[in-house]
Image: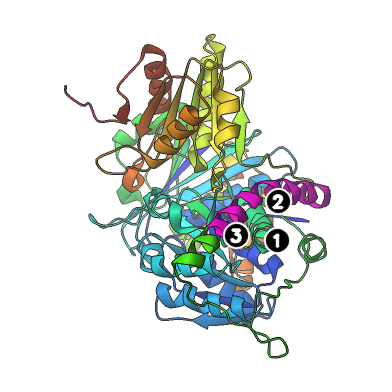
């Protein structure tokens, strides 16, 4: 292994080099651009043997990746924000066709007002598109997810495309030290992609067909089961990963000092680190604070979350998202889990960081104190709402 | 945690300095963590660039922009204002590329003259050398390691010379 000082985008590109995708089709968009630039440089200097296809749009980028996957090879694409929305039509084709494509998405706000900075409204708007969704906290986890995503997506019983999300700028453009595995290690972890879900002259079959009401429903059910199967495969992938690379991951969620916590912030992505630091600070004053980081939004960790928070006095969902006219989508998902599992813990929603606005340590302290005192159901960080 | 705020204009290499310092610090070995990032946004030549390096012996979890820095390094003296003192920690220092000595906690260093002698178009690595020598956060060897590993090869010799010359001047 070699240690290097890299940005999240660069770290992810290094991970993709180790994965050896045979086809890369992507269209550049800030803050994803560096991933595409690095990969094209790797193809150019022959350190990565891959077909790099310059496409004219994101819609084509994913269509192209699907074509490659249907030919039986490993395919990669990357996008962000408006690009993700532009390829939205194809997201459903990829998942419905059970093509295990991996896409890196740099989480960025959606227009209007036009903005290139980070929030998570782009990917969270696509939760129902049938893609596995993971959210990285730092550059190392980003690189490691590049490797694990293919392992999980390509497992026959999963056969589901995988979206790895990195917070725009805060992860994509921040440099930190990462451990880059060797190619030999990566090859042991992730062998060459083999599938029978492909166009094959010796064994011709119909692919990407239409299905009427009778059968369509069965395909959708099987898609759901494929996604549910990912839960145990994620565990299996992480176990194998730690055996080979020595780094451990904790499945669908990651917890910090939740065992005895009265107040737990539930969040996702790069802000979790500052939440943990704040929890430590509050604990010095006797306030039992904890943090639950959601690593996977799909499949959704309903049981895992409720098991952790069931003894808390209250929980707060901190998210960079809003479903206008309702509340944050992560909050809706968490509340549904609490209700389904009959856990009666008060829950509050804190929406912040939209359009890249800073969330400070004092904002997070304020969340902990508000959830202790009780507050509005839906709160906007930094905006006082008058009754 | 040691926090450094770099101020420069687009094209002066403030962010490159922020990165080099982070790479230099982590190259010391185990238990050395760093984050380096620019003030995010579209890049424009000549516009104000703020860049940040955070150094610690524990993983750096706070990814937000530095509010109070231990060192503010200014590559272009026209960016200096006494208000910057509000962005300094107690005993924090401002290091500025300038021929003129001004306030008490401001250390001036004439990087432009060295750059002229060495025919360097920018002074970012000179100021990185100055900061490392004054602060002692990293050694000259650490900085040279970062240059050799994170700058294009054709720039190595000139920038290594620049750092060595700067270090020599500070130690005079």
User: Tag 1's secondary structure?
Assistant: loop
Q: CA distance from mark 3 to mark 2?
A: 21 Å
Q: Which residue sits furthest top?
A: A286
**Labels 3 & 1 near each other (Cβ < 8 A):** no
Q: Nearer the viewer, residue B51 or A128?
A: A128
For label 2, the crowd category at 10 Å Cα-Cα, with few meaning under 14, some 14 to 19 and many 20 or more, is some
Q: Nearer the viewer, mark 3 or mark 1?
A: 1
Q: Which residue sits furthest bottom?
A: A201
Residue A233 tag number? 2
- Asked whether A240 falls inside the magenta stretch, the response is yes
Q: Nearer the viewer, mark 3 or mark 2?
A: 2
What number of labels is visible?
Answer: 3
For label 3, the crowd category at 10 Å Cα-Cα, with few meaning under 14, some 14 to 19 and many 20 or more, is many
Q: Earlier in the sequence, mark 3 or mark 2?
A: 3
The residue that mark 1 highlights is: A155
**Up-down: is B32 above or below A372?**
below
**Labels 1 & 2 near each other (Cβ < 8 A):** yes
- Residue sitting at 38 percent across and 25 percent down? A348
- Residue sitting at 60 percent across and 26 percent down? A307
| Boundaries of the magenta span | A221-245
Q: Which quadrant would the C terminus of chain A be assigned to in this image?
A: top left
Marks 3 and 2 on same chain: yes
From the viewer's perspective, tell me whether residue B76 is left or right of residue A238. Answer: left
- Residue sitting at 61 percent across and 41 percent down? A252
The residue that mark 3 highlights is: A12
Kindly report the secondary structure that dominates the magenta region of the rendered protein: helix
**Up-down: is A72 above or below A4?**
below
Residue A154 in view in this figure: yes
């Amino acid at each position: 292994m070699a240690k290097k000082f890299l940005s999240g985008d660069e770290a992810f590109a290094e991970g993709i080099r180790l994965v050896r995708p045979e086809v890369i089709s992507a269209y550049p968009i800030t803050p994803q651009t560096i991933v595409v630039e690095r990969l094209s440089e790797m193809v150019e200097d022959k350190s990565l043997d891959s077909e790099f296809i310059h496409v004219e749009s994101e819609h084509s980028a994913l269509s192209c990746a699907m074509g490659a996957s249907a030919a039986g090879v490993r395919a990669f694409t990357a996008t962000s924000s408006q690009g993700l929305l532009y390829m939205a039509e194809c997201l459903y084709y990829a998942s419905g066709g059970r093509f295990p494509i991996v896409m890196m998405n740099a989480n960025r706000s959606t227009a209007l007002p036009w903005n290139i900075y980070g929030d998570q409204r782009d990917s969270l708007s696509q939760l129902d598109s049938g893609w596995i969704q993971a959210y990285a906290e730092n550059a190392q986890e980003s690189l490691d997810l590049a490797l694990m995503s293919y392992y999980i997506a390509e497992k026959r019983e999963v056969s589901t495309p995988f979206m790895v999300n990195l917070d725009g700028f805060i992860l994509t453009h921040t440099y930190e030290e990462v451990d880059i595995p060797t190619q030999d290690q990566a090859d042991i972890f992730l062998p060459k992609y083999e599938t029978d879900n492909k166009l094959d002259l010796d064994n011709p079959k119909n692919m990407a067909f239409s299905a009427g009401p009778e059968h369509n429903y069965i395909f959708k059910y099987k898609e759901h089961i494929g996604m549910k199967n990912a839960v145990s495969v994620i565990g299996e992938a992480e176990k194998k990963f730690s055996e080979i690379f020595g780094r451990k991951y904790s499945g669908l969620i990651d917890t910090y000092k939740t065992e005895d916590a009265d107040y737990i912030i539930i969040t996702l992505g790069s802000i979790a680190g500052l939440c943990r630091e704040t929890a430590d600070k509050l604990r010095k004053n006797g306030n039992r604070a904890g943090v639950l980081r959601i690593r996977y939004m799909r499949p959704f960790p309903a049981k895992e979350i409720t098991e952790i928070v069931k003894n808390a006095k209250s929980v707060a969902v901190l998210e960079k998202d809003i479903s206008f006219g309702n509340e944050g989508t992560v909050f809706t998902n968490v509340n549904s889990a609490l209700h389904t599992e009959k856990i009666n813990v008060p829950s509050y929603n804190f929406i912040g960081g939209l359009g890249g606005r800073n969330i400070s340590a004092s904002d997070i302290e304020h969340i902990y104190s508000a959830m202790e005192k009780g507050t509005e159901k839906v709160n906007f960080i930094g905006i006082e709402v008058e009754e | 945690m040691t926090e450094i705020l770099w101020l420069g204009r687009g094209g002066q290499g403030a962010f490159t300095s922020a990165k080099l310092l982070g790479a230099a610090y982590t190259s010391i070995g185990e238990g050395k963590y760093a984050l380096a990032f620019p003030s995010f946004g579209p890049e424009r030549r000549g516009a104000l660039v703020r860049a940040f390096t955070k150094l610690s012996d524990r993983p750096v979890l706070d990814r937000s922009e530095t509010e109070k820095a231990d060192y503010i390094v200014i590559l272009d003296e026209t960016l200096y204002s006494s208000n910057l003192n509000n962005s300094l920690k107690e005993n924090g220092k401002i290091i500025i590329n300038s021929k003129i000595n001004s306030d008490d906690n401001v250390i001036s260093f004439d990087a432009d003259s060295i750059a002229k002698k060495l025919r360097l178009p920018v002074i970012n690595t000179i100021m990185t050398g100055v900061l490392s020598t004054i602060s002692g956060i990293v050694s000259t060897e650490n900085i040279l390691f970062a240059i050799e590993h994170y700058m294009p090869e054709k720039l190595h010799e000139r920038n290594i010379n620049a750092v060595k010359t700067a270090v020599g001047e500070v130690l005079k």
